[in-house]
Structure formats: structure tokens, C-alpha cells
Image: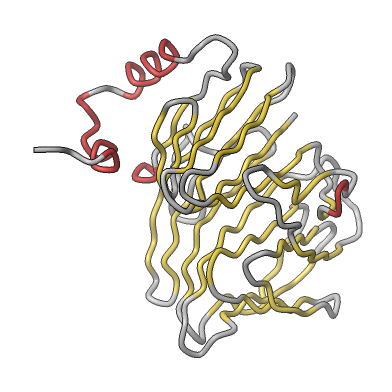
Amino acid sequence: MAISRRSLLSLGLGLTTASFVRRLRARTPPGRAALTIRRAIDRGHANQGWLDTHHTFSFADYYDPNNMGFRALRVINEDRIKADSGFPMHPHRDMEIITYVMEGALTHKDSLGNGGVIVPGEVQRMSAGTGIRHSELNASLSESVHLLQIWLLPERTGYAPSYEQRPIAARSNDFRLIASPDGAHKSVTIGQNCRVFAATLAKGDGASFVLRPGRHVWLQVARGLVTVNGELLEGGDAAHGSVPGAIEIASDEASEVLLFELA
């Protein structure tokens, strides 16, 4: 009986995490970045009825001392918010917050007077600074919204809060810069030495990235099924590393991938 490539992910192949990582690194061809895999199934999970959420790093009631963040990357929450529901007004401070919507529409309002609706193909950045309050509500009365909320620690504290929302430039078969310290290529500006890229891939598409010396990478599969340096990853899976080299991605089905290049 044939076993699908996706089914192999759930088998585990009887490997411990340490032995799995060793084998993965041993298989990494010369010139490619060595990556460590974090599977979606290992994330924290909470379902509050109106909110079904998975936490890549420790968050709220989910605590894992081995997964408190990666470099300045502190939170990647995959949220599904039911229709006519959402987060009421609540405070933040000293955090760079990026919202990336895959499906549906999210309404934002904040204490600075900003308001808008975030949909797929856009990126929102909120720098909490000395303090800001905001709400995030599903804009639909009938459809759920599926998004990633990302928090980065800022390089400095005590700055004024601010907000920014931009469309993501369409580009097939490649990564697009969506957040950066200098707002390059019409990306949103964040107060951290980090560049965030997004790739939306059709089946059979590919994308590549070269990790430079002294930099670190976290790759998050937002949805779909991709092969990263020979390793099959599905939605919610991640790969990270600090060894310079190439990262080659091939899409096995329609997929979205975010890549964080960090100091």
C-alpha cells in the first residue's frame, strides 16, 4: 500500500528529536543551510470556542521553557476567529506586532484613532511603544478569519506607538519583503533588526533564500505543503537555523510561507 508524503509526517519514524535533527543535518547537501524542524503538532493549542489558536512559542497558558522564542521573535500565533467575534480592546507596550491574514477579513481599531480592515494580500504593523490599546474583530457575520499574529521584541523601549498597513507587492515564485527596519521596497517599518519575507506559491512553484553569516532564520509554513532543503513541511511546521547557506523551497500544493531573517 502506498503511503502519501503527507502521511509520513505523522508517523515520526521512531526517531527522538535529537536523532531526527542529527539525521536531518547529516542529509543537508553542501552549500545549503542546516535547519532544525519544529512540527505543528508540537505547538501549544487552545480552543475558546470563538478562538481556535496554536502557539509556536510559549504564550498565555502554554509554557515550554525550550520554546520561549527565537532571537527577537517572541510570538507566532495561528488564530482562527469565528464570525462576529474577536479580541475586544486590550493593551500592549514595548512590542512590534505584525498581523498577516490568510483567509477572511480582520477589523482593527486602536487608541491612536487608526482603523481599517486587513485582508489577504496586506500586512499590518503596530508598534506598541510606550502603550497602545486596540481591538481585532472578525469583519464577517458568516465567515471565519484565519491569520498569523507575530510579535517581535523591539531594539529599544520608550518610543511613541504607531501603526502602518500596506498591500503586499504581487510577485510569483519568490519571496517579497513585507517588514524591515528601514521600510525598504514599500515594506512596513519595524523597530528591530529583522527582515520579514512572504512567499505565496502555487503547486510546483519554488522560492529560494541565502542566509548570510551572522544572521539567523526562522521559516514558518503558514498553510499548504512545501519541501524545504529536502524536508517535507506542512502548514504550522517551522524550520530554523544559524548556519549560512541556501534555503530552497518547492511547493507541493498551494502554499504560503513566511521567512524571518534576524540578527
The answer to whether 70 appears left or right of 45 in the picture is: right
Q: Is residue 12 visible to the viewer in this orientation of the structure?
A: yes
- Asked where in the image residue 32 lies, by quadrant, the reply is top right
Locate residue 55 relative to residue 91 in the image: left or right.
left
Side (left or right) of 6 relative to 34: left
Residue drawn where x is 60% and y is 37% of the image: 207
Indicate the position of residue 218 as horizontal and vertical percent values: 59, 35
Viewer-side residue, 196 vs 66: 196
Q: How many marks?
A: 0
Query: Dividing the picture into quarters, in which one does residue 212 lie?
Result: top right
Taking the spot 85% from the left edge, 80% from the top edge, the residue there is 113
Q: Can residue 57 be seen in the rendering of this structure?
A: no
Q: Residue furthest front?
A: 204
Residue positioned 59% across, 83% down in the render: 139
Q: Is residue 145 above or below residue 254?
A: below
Outermost residue on the left side: it is 1
Residue 210, x across and y down, in percent: 68, 25
Quadrant showing the C terminus: top right
What's the coloring here? secondary structure
Q: With respect to residue 15, does 200 lie above or below?
A: below
Quadrant of the image for the N terminus?
top left
Viewer-nearest residue: 29 or 259? 29
Q: 60 above or below 73?
A: below
Residue 100 in the image, given as x and y percentages of width and height: 63, 60
Estimate the x, y position of residue 262 in percent, counting from the top left: 71, 33
The residue at the point 43 percent across, 26 percent down is 230
